[in-house]
Amino acid sequence: MNDLRRKIQSLPKGDVHSHLHLSAGIDLLKDEYPKLDLSVPQYYKGFEGMMLFIEQYINTFMTSSEKAINLMDIGIRSSMADNVTCLEASIDINLFRFFNNSVKELIEAVDRLKMKYLGQIDFRPEIGIKKNSPSEIIYESGIQCIESGVFDGLDIYGNEKGMDLSGFQELFLYAKTKKLKTKVHVGEFSGHETIEKAIELLEPDEIQHGIHAAESGNTMHMIVERGIRINICPQSNIALGAVADIYAHPIRKLYDSGINLTINTDDLLLFNATLTDQYVNLIEHDIFTFEEVNEIRMNSLV
């Protein structure tokens, strides 16, 4: 391990854009399941290619509540192995299908995970809801999760193009009354207009990805003016083809515009790049200095 990697690995870090059941480090996962035949590609054929990989490999493995919980548990331990001290990770609400179709049982399982790692890591689970979810999932199950007191945030994700987010407006308002942090995935594959629309409609605290804000000075100004943080996942963006490579990534432009941003893993299991890996990569490719990366690291701990 070189000096730079050793230095960064030793620093406390925050991962604030993560999907917990997809956050297991591959080495830890294979230690736990040595017979698991899983080869993670370096690149996917876009968002649809990633979803196909999940369907073919992850969903055929994750077949019970025990495996779902264990994947999330390994995700937490993988974060701790990289000296992540603050982990904001979404729990896909649809995982309740493994818990006797009971949202209550899923909530109880998440609460047990919080208790298990209390004092070891600042684990802040978020309610994860796909944008194309039926209204009973959005409101009945979503409100049940909000009122449980177990979750610290709300995150909506999925296909970005042509999605009407108005069905989430009341849920976001209600989450805010309960002091939950609100996040929306937008602007990775969709243009800057979709980011502005999501901001106007949902008034999120944070945007997941949001890299196409760099297309518009007005969009970047709106983000800065409203104090919205953007949680960027460079390796995810590259692997999914949202950008060609690290040099084409607009993260530097977003940083220079004054936007408060963070660097995150997204799905460690799918993209196989820790926070340390990504910080080192950005420095070694002269995108940021160590001092700038350290500033971004500190953003994630606030």
Image (spheres, grey):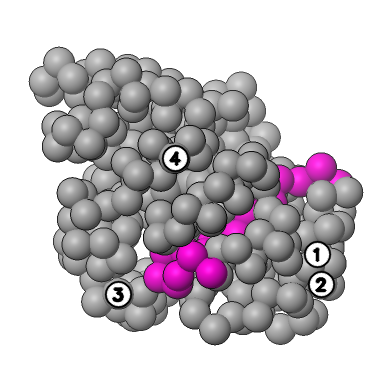
Gap in Å between the C-alphas at discs 1 and 3? 29 Å
Verify whether residue 179 appears in magenta. yes
Q: What's the residue at 40%, 70% (across, down)?
A: 189
In the rendered image, residue 172, in percent from the top left (x then y), is placed at 77, 60
Report the amino acid beneath label 2. Tyr
User: Label 1: which residue?
Assistant: 171
Q: What's the residue at 45%, 70% (across, down)?
A: 191
User: Label 4: which residue?
Assistant: 257
Report the amino acid beneath label 3. Gly
Report the amino acid beneath label 4. Ser
Stretch of the chain drawn in magenta: 178-193
Side of 239 where 222 appears, left or right: right
Do the CB atoms of the residues marked 4 and 1 lie less than 8 Å apart?
A: no
Kindly state the secondary structure of the residue where label 3 is placed: helix
Q: From this viewpoint, which residue is outermost toward the left?
A: 2
In the rendered image, residue 136, in percent from the top left (x then y), is placed at 79, 80
User: Label 2: which residue?
Assistant: 139
Give the mark nearest the N terminus, 1 or 3. 3
User: Label 3: which residue?
Assistant: 46
Q: Nearer the viewer, residue 171 or 189?
A: 189
Q: Is residue 3 above or below residue 123?
A: above
Do the CB atoms of the residues marked 1 and 2 lie less than 8 Å apart?
A: yes
